[in-house]
Amino acid sequence: MHAIDRVAMNARLHYLGMAARISQPTLKLAVLTCMDARVDPARLLGLQPGDAHVIRNAGGRATTDALHALAISQAVLGTQEVMVLHHTECAMRRFSRSELAERIMAATNHPFHDDPGVFTDDVEAVVEDVGRIRAYPSLAHRERVRGFLYDLSTNALTEVAPQERK
Ligand SMILES: [Zn+2]
């Protein structure tokens, strides 16, 4: 069985009748995090269906795409807080931009020129993404944007970019 068939079957079994009915997240929260398979935002943060938006990409970076999603999340679906959640041992830190481009090119035979969002310091990357979100003018709510680092080895969540003091 292919992986997609397996998870589609899990979805049918697990969420039978459990789907949330209201599209606005009840916690008014959006989480921006990494796609890393070891990070399970729902379990880690205790989120149930309907609680929050979870936006994921490689690194949990505040890319243009992620910012667009946050703008829609706030203006259309009523979220007011943003939690940036990065983690240790991230692949976006292990590789340099050129190494990643080489890997993608080797796998596809097609040149890769986009910025994959690599970083060299876990904490700095969170602070940078929190800063980008706070500076994005298309967000209605920028006063509660906070950044966290999840340590995979200790299972601990540490706040590294607290909300701005007002
Ligand atoms: Zn990662």
Image: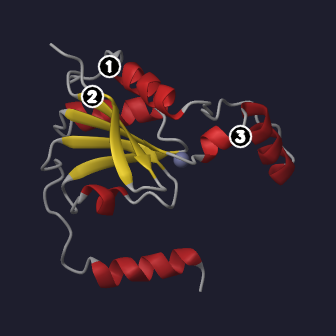
Q: Which residue is mark 2?
A: 145
Amino acid carrying mark 2 in the image? Val
* Vertical placement of residue 116 versus 14, above or below: above
Q: Earlier in the sequence, mark 3 or mark 2?
A: 3
Amino acid carrying mark 3 in the image? Phe
Q: Secondary structure at mark 1?
A: helix
Q: Residues within 10 Å of mark 1 (few under 14, many from 20)?
A: many
The numbered disc on residue 5 is none
29 or 127, which is in the foreground?
Answer: 127
Task: Name the residue: 12% across, 50% down.
Answer: 26
Q: Position of residue 106 (x, y in %)?
A: 86, 49
Colour option used: secondary structure
Q: CA distance from mark 2 to mark 1?
A: 7 Å
The numbered disc on residue 95 is 3
Residue 63 visible in the shown view: no
Q: CA distance from mark 3 to mark 1?
A: 27 Å
Is the C-beta separation of discs 2 and 1 under 8 Å? yes
The numbered disc on residue 134 is 1
Q: Position of residue 44 (x, y in %)?
A: 32, 58
Q: Position of residue 103 (x, y in %)?
A: 80, 46
Say left or right for 139 vs 151.
left
Q: Residue at the far front: name it.
A: 154
Q: Secondary structure at mark 3?
A: loop
Q: Quadrant of the N terminus?
A: bottom right
Task: Name the residue: 36% across, 51% down.
Answer: 156
Q: Earlier in the sequence, mark 3 or mark 1?
A: 3
Q: Quadrant of the C terminus?
A: top left
Q: CA distance from mark 3 to mark 2?
A: 27 Å
Amino acid carrying mark 1 in the image? Arg
Task: Name the residue: 41% across, 47% down.
Answer: 150
Say left or right for 101 vs 22.
right
